[in-house]
Amino acid sequence: MISRPSLLSVFFASVFILPAAAHAQSGVRPKPTPADEDERVYTEEVRIPVFATDERGRFDPALEIPDVLVVEDDVPQQVKSVRRIPASVLLLLATGGELNPSMRVSTTREVALNVVENLREGDRVSVIQFHSQAQVAQEWTADREAAARALRSKLAFGRGSRLSQAIIRAAQLFEGEPAGNRHLVVVTDGVEAPARIDAKDALLVLGVDTP
């Protein structure tokens, strides 16, 4: 079950840290040498991921700077900004359902369209469909209408279910996306099966030892 409001909503609070606090994080303060005294590292800003929810566990869009308290070594730090980072959402959709009648392409499409419809401004989405092989149906885009058109026109029924191959392809597609708010949404029955399969192998895939 996907909780749409909380799934795609991540805030980053940016905090100024004094240069002297850089050593405090490890708890060890090495004795400076003459060479060390000439080398200083200044930390201007630190980004901290914050998940904001209300008392019912739902996404709270009203988070502001006074609502955030950051403490380091018992010293409150100055919060400079609170902002939402746009999400990168990759839809990994199984379209090979000959072993499972409930895995209809129409149902998979409906689920995917529902996710796309609930994306927020600035979020990016990509779509991979997989059966005997993994195929990119939609490259990364912030255009929800374009993603919806790809879901309606490019999803096609196939044979087999190469889930592991699809996950590898998804990892490759994520490489170019910024870290921090990336999400993989998988619609599948979890079955891994080749494109051609006989009755005995089908029973084994489904966990049935004997006919």
Image (cartoon, rainbow, N blue to C red):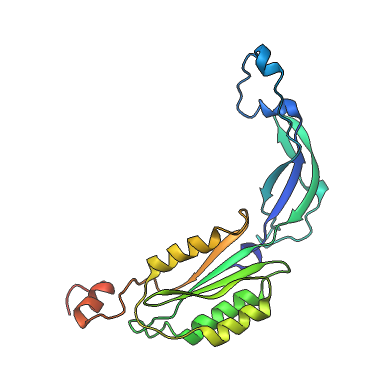
Q: Is residue 149 left or right of residue 173?
A: right
Residue 159 visible at all: yes
Residue 109 at x, y = what percent? 53, 82
From this view, report whether residue 80 is shown above or below residue 75: below
Residue at x-position 71% and y-position 69%: 120
Residue at x-position 43% and y-position 86%: 157
From this view, report whether residue 30 is shown above or below residue 98: above
Residue 170 at x, y = what percent? 49, 65
Q: Is residue 118 left or right of residue 137?
A: right
Q: Quadrant of the C terminus?
A: bottom left
Residue 105 at x, y = what percent? 47, 85
Residue, far left: 210
Front residue (pair 66, 153): 153
The answer to which quarter of the image holds residue 26 is top right
Count of numbered labels shown in the rendering: 0
Q: Is residue 88 left or right of residue 37?
A: left
From this view, report whether residue 170 is shown above or below residue 30: below
Residue at x-position 81% and y-position 52%: 64
Q: Is residue 81 left or right of residue 204?
A: right
Front residue (pair 23, 56): 23
Residue 69 visible at all: no
The answer to which quarter of the image holds residue 11 is bottom right
Front residue (pair 130, 173): 173
Residue at x-position 74% and y-position 48%: 13
From this view, report whether residue 136 is shown above or below residue 169: below
